[in-house]
Image (spheres, coloured by chain):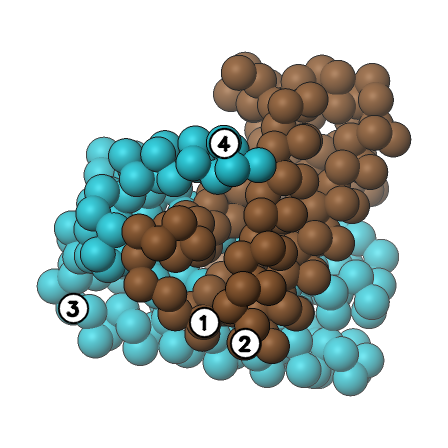
Chain colours: A cyan, B brown
Amino acid sequence: MRTFVLLVITVLGASLGSTASAVAVKPETAVNYRQGIYHAILWNFAPMAQMVQGRQPWNQATFAQGAARIAFYSQQLLEGFPPGSLTARSEAKPAIWQHWTEFSTKMRNFENASATLAMVAKSGDEAASKVAFGKTAQTCKSCHDAFRKE
Amino acid sequence: MRTFVLLVITVLGASLGSTASAVAVKPETAVNYRQGIYHAILWNFAPMAQMVQGRQPWNQATFAQGAARIAFYSQQLLEGFPPGSLTARSEAKPAIWQHWTEFSTKMRNFENASATLAMVAKSGDEAASKVAFGKTAQTCKSCHDAFRKE
């Protein structure tokens, strides 16, 4: 166990740089993290979208579970965009750090919309769930349009 | 908004295949998802490991937050390993699907250990937190040793 922990620290130390603070996180590490969160969001968002469009049978429980997860993931994203974390593989536009207030506001909008979606979905109201889903999707689009590479 | 949702569904439909069930999820989609969750776990695990080893100042609140997140992520992993989801980029060994009972048991061990870690960390007991962290790390190692490519 100790060996494993030391191995993890060595590997992570190499990938994370200084131990001082998140500022020292290597760009690739941040990119892997945030893209990971986005993939997790997509994993849950996709079947929900298909339900909303009637391409998959409506299942309130599955929809609510996806919504709860997305609400959680939405809160994990902002920290994945530390300054200087642009890499060739990143889909982030440099504008994010030039317009951080706008970016973080759009992220907050996503957090709020997905929190509402989770609450509504849990209530069991199918119609309201679809409305809340649409509003959440709008927050995704708003941020992507401004800050995500084509 | 509707256009965005339709775009998402089209893109996701292409990537997810049939709408029938998760069985039809494309291998690459599952790989992206589960690797995303693992990256998210690592993002939180790394600073916790450094605290446990005294390479970073102990911060119970930060440690507890990381533990709570990891406990959540641990429950999102198993579904990311549907049958037939091996790709060149995947770090999974085929043994996972040959020994699914063993793999899922090890995953359950990780879920349980990280749930305990989250609870202990929230209690504020630093010493107990370190012990629970070590036990969680053991469950990571146990599964990696058996089912993760070198």
Residue at the spot 70% in from the left edge and 46% down from the top edge: B110
- Residue pointed to by mark 4: A3
Residue toward you, B9 or B83: B83
Whether residue A145 appears in this view of the structure is no
Residues tagged 2 and 1 counted as in contact (Cβ below 8 A): yes
Q: Nearer the viewer, mark 1 or mark 3?
A: 1
Residue at the spot 61% in from the left edge and 33% down from the top edge: B141
Q: Rate crowding at label 1 as few (under 14), some (14 to 19) or many (20 or more) other CA atoms within 10 Å.
A: some
Is B76 situated above or below B13? Answer: below
Is A121 situated above or below B85? Answer: below
- Residue pointed to by mark 2: B124
Residues tagged 4 and 1 counted as in contact (Cβ below 8 A): no
Chain under numbered label 3: A
Task: Estimate the spatial distance between the alpha carbons at disc 3 and disc 4, rounded to whole Å.
Answer: 44 Å
| Res. A99 mark | 3
Which SS class for mark 2? loop
| Res. A50 mark | none
